[in-house]
């Protein structure tokens, strides 16, 4: 399996699972609101997003196990350098922003269309959640593509 294909599968595995967990938690709290759009920036129903996310994660898990025998590839040494540090930071902090705004969407959903901060009128909380999730996934993909394998080709 190529490094890029593995990175795509790993990102689909993780972010598909996270997307489904969010929809499942939302469904437990607001079962009658599942037919609403997941976010203003994403023209997809919340329940449809959950089903697609679950299917993507499960398919990625099957492909990764069947092709490589592992769900996640361990790196032989920690990645260093400015670019990798930025990618890892965007992946982690983008995910934290998304998680925070997911909780907001369940505790006070009426604020999702409001501006995120008083400093500027844009973006909204909902747009920021989508951007944080997407930026984190792209950063993880790029970080997983960039990391070298061990000298023996194993992880």
Image (cartoon, helix red, strand yellow):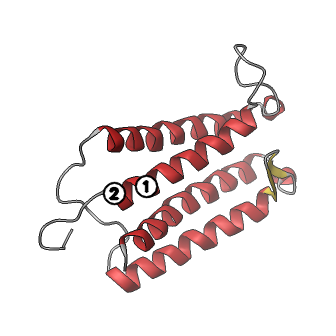
Placement of the N terminus among the 4 image quadrants: bottom left
Pointer 1 with pointer 2, Cβ within 8 A: yes
Q: Is residue 141 left or right of residue 77?
A: right
Residue placed furthest toward the top: 119
For the residue pair 110 and 91, the one nearer the viewer reads as 91
- Percent of width and height locating residue 83: 35, 42
Rate crowding at label 2 as few (under 14), some (14 to 19) or many (20 or more) other CA atoms within 10 Å. Answer: some
- Percent of width and height locating residue 32: 87, 52
- Percent of width and height locating residue 123: 74, 30
Q: Which residue is mark 1?
A: 142
Q: Is residue 96 left or right of residue 26?
A: left
For the residue pair 154 and 65, the one nearer the viewer reads as 154
Asked if residue 43 can be seen in this view, the reply is yes
Asked if residue 106 can be seen in this view, the reply is no
Query: Which label is found at residue 146?
Result: 2
Q: Secondary structure at mark 2?
A: helix
The residue at 32%/80% (across/down) is: 69
In the displayed structure, 114 sits above or below 147; it is above
The residue at 70%/62% (across/down) is: 50
C-alpha span from label 1 to label 2: 6 Å
């Amino acid at each position: 399996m190529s490094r890029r294909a593995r990175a795509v599968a790993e990102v689909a595995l993780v972010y598909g699972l996270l997307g489904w967990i969010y929809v499942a938690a939302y469904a437990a709290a607001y079962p009658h609101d599942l037919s609403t759009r997941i976010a203003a920036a994403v023209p997809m129903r919340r329940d449809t997003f959950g089903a697609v996310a679950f299917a993507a994660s499960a398919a990625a898990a099957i492909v990764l196990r069947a092709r490589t025998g592992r769900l996640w590839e361990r790196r032989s040494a920690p990645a260093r350098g400015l670019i990798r540090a930025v990618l890892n930071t965007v992946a982690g902090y983008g995910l934290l922003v998304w998680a925070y705004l997911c909780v907001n969407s369940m505790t006070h959903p009426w604020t999702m269309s409001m501006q995120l901060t008083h400093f500027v009128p844009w973006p909204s909380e909902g747009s920021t959640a989508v951007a944080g999730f997407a930026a984190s996934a792209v950063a993880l993909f790029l970080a997983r593509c960039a990391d070298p394998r061990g000298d023996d080709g194993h992880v």
